[in-house]
Amino acid sequence: MLLVLAMTTALLHKYGDWRRQHLLVSAATLVAWYFSFSIVAILPIDVVQTNYKQCLFNYNFNNNNNLSNFSRSRRSSQLGVSSDTFDSSLLDPNDSSPTGSTSSPRPHNATTPPPPSTVAPPTSPCSEPITNVDDDVIKALWLVVYWSSFVLTWLILPFMQSYSMAGEFTVLGKTKRSLIENAIFYASYMAIVFALVLYLIVKGQFKFDRESIKILVTTASNTWGLFFMVLLMGYGLVEVPRYVWDLSRREHRLRRTYFQVAKLHTEKGDATEALEDILDNIKDAHAQIPQTSMFYPHLQIILSESPSNFQDRLKSRSGMTLARGRDRAGDVGGGGGVPGAEYASEKRLVLLHKRLLVARQNLWRLEAKWEALLKKAFKLEDIVKSKSSGTSEFRRYSKGTSAKHPICTPRMEFYWRIVVVPKLFQISGVVLALLSVILVWSEVTFFRKEPVLSIYAIFLDLFAENNQYILIQVMCVLLLVFMCVTVYWTVFRVRFFNFYYLSPHHHTDEYTLLFSGMLLCRLTPSICLNFLGVAHMDSHVSDKKGQQSCSFTDVMGHLDIVYFISDGFNIYFPLVLIVLCLMTLFNVGSHILSFIGFQQFMGDGELTSELVDEGQQLIKRGYY
């Protein structure tokens, strides 16, 4: 858990900036991310604990049956009665009825399952795992993770998200705006739930009691989370191995970087123009609102969040305007105080303030990404040119690259960067691709109960039969890590225009950080349920008699889907996953975006080649 906390803190440091951002935003994001990543540590312990309980259950059950059968056989032989026709009521000292009585004999308890126990008898073959803890501890951890994630994702983070982007100038105004926006959000959710309840009532599948409401909420949440998880996983299962493999293709990466530089140069120019337009509007507002106006403090807040060079220009201009205005009117404020001005209203200033926040953050993020892309291009150019030089020595051709390594010689650095590292990336890409194939197979077959086709379930059963708890835990950690990487990869890599984008090097805005925490918290239960289903540790999936349940399912429920789609879920769930993987493999999304006019890197396409050449020229002009 401490290791997960350290890794989460390092990841947040990479994307966020606690010095610039509000402390509550950083703390809420850290907690949301930590609880989402902590399943890698908690769930394997839960699985090992469950397998240990299953071993004890099977041992006690079989031992109890063996003793009962032995007792019946011995006593029947003493009475000269066959064990097949032996009536246990003959041996019951508390049963006073005669042999031929019509009263029913006392039920035999040989097949009654013993109560679960986490303490192995002295002669038990079940070895206690190293990570064995009390069930109450695991359940308490799941309760903390679940309810903390629930409160964060549905109450705290949405409110903080709206608050961070509110253009109002007071705490009360920002709070009011956040409550209004979230009320609209929750009203839409309530409308969907109401429609679902109405449908189930018409079908006669819903009753207004506590248990029915709990099942409805749980299954609806599971359904939403599983479909959202499939969308993200379908992309990550293909893109993660391909990304690692492409790290070995230096020439391809350099062309893609040139393409990104050209696109980013255009985006940065557009963002600069957008900010300049907003600054012109601020300049107009400053000229229209006098210092005596009730809106002047709001204008000062907007000016304080403007670029410093713009503030300096405006102050010098304001001084000259103020002198001329006093000569004409005697005493006017910041910019002349034009009567009936269009910006002399709180609503217009709030809108202007919000536009400034968005435009400033967007330009700042693009400038940071520009610097990172340039450094990446310099590094790749050095590698490509050193590879084609024919000298077997690594040289630095660009001004923007770092100095020579103090220990490695140019020849050692050449073999490391150009020979060894690409091979390591290729091997890693092949291993990840193999894991993706295994996971896809297990995902599309885990609904099959007999015979078991899920590869992970087969290995887990094999390790459990031999009480190999360490191997069980290692396998669970590796599978969970890979599942989290494929799902969370999309969360950290996807970009929705300028609305949501996690930018490294401390340049992610507060809104995106909170939004990512909200997504991760909503995905956490779904990943756990899907993992238990793939491993056949969920009794509602495997349908095994006498199967011990995990503490997770005791707290959060099973892999259940809403009624009207549950019948065909085992058909379209695999189909959706396979279709998404194939679409990602063949870059269907990029082709569609390119067709409708969005510039995408398409290999040797004409537009791609033009942008690659443009990016190469931009780097040569500015940084050589």
Image (cartoon, rainbow, N blue to C red):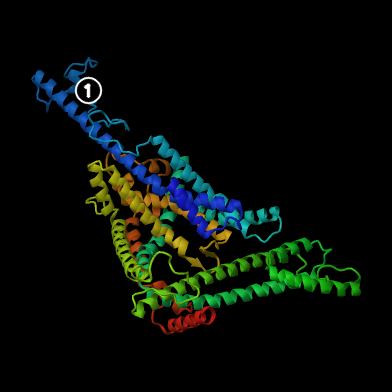
User: Which quarter of the picture shows residue 165?
Assistant: bottom right
Left or right side of 405 for 23: right
Left or right side of 342 for 438: left
Task: Report whether residue 110 is seen.
Answer: yes
> Which residue bears the numbered disc 1?
105
Task: Looking at the picture, tell me which residue is in the foreground, 21 or 454.
Answer: 21
Q: Please count the marks in the image.
A: 1
Q: Residue pushed farthest left?
A: 80
Which quadrant of the rendered structure holds the N terminus? top left
- SS category of the residue bearing label 1: loop
Residue 471, x across and y down, in percent: 28, 46
Instruction: Please name the residue shown 46% across and 71% down the image.
Output: 376
Left or right side of 110 for 14: right
Residue flagged by tag 1: what amino acid is it? Answer: Pro
Residue 205, x across and y down, in percent: 41, 48
User: Which quarter of the picture shows residue 254?
Assistant: bottom left
User: Which quarter of the picture shows residue 231?
Assistant: bottom left
Residue 606, x across and y down, in percent: 42, 85
Residue 307, x across and y down, in percent: 67, 68
Instruction: Please name the residue shown 66% across and 64% down the image.
Output: 354
Task: Looking at the picture, tell me which residue is in the foreground, 45 or 108.
Answer: 45
Task: Report whether residue 251 is seen.
Answer: no
Instruction: Please name the residue shown 22% across and 23% down the image.
Output: 105
